[in-house]
Amino acid sequence: MMLVPNIKESQNSLFERYIKDIALGDKEALANLYEQTKSAIYGFSLSILRNTHEAEDVLQDVYIKVYENANTYQANGKPLAWMITITKNLSLMKLRKNKNHKNVDELKEVLTDNKGIKDAENKLIIDTIFSNISEEERNILVLHSVSGLKHREIAKILGIPLTTVLSKYNRTIKKIKRKLGEERK
């Protein structure tokens, strides 16, 4: 019987190797890590800040922090969770500093401009999702669906109980399905 490698585990190992190499000053490892994680980092930052320019600033700052702090990273099999925590902290600092963030329409615009989201039905789905869920629900959804983090990792990052993350995620999915069912009638 042939064993199929766990993609998530091999990806985590690769990211950890990049971080180890970054700690040794390898800028190519930083470029590789950036290319493979930038969508998740940017998407999460954008879900918090709801401003493309500020999210781009945070994206850049995250990789600067990764470069500066790679030597302090403790390999635990969750390098993306470490980076998401950095993203959350930098995004929240920027929010507190600016206090004038834009509404969710900018996030919807960025997502619908994505090359993979061209047809009207997908745009309707995104509009439905963002107009019917709270900011916390949106963060949980983005972290799980876009970033691929586990619910327990999300609970730790957001500082809320695991049961809350699970219930909000499940309620959000049900809410979206119910709303989509109404709109398709």
Image: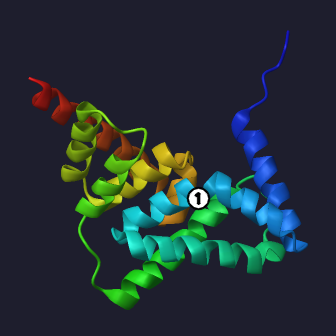
Q: Position of residue 156 (x, y in %)?
A: 55, 61
Q: Residue furthest top?
A: 1
Taking the spot 79% from the left edge, 28% from the top edge, the residue there is: 5
Q: Residue furthest right?
A: 24
Q: The C terminus appears in which quarter of the rendering? A: top left
Q: Is residue 112 left or right of residue 77?
A: left
Q: Residues within 10 Å of mark 1 (few under 14, many from 20)?
A: some
Taking the spot 61% from the left edge, 73% from the top edge, the residue there is: 62
Q: Position of residue 43 (x, y in %)?
A: 46, 58
Identify the secondary structure beneath mark 1: helix
Q: Position of residue 15 (x, y in %)?
A: 76, 54
Is residue 164 in view? yes
How is the model colour-coded? rainbow
Taking the spot 46% from the left edge, 84% from the top edge, the residue there is: 93
Q: The N terminus appears in which quarter of the rendering? A: top right
**Tag 1 residue:** 38
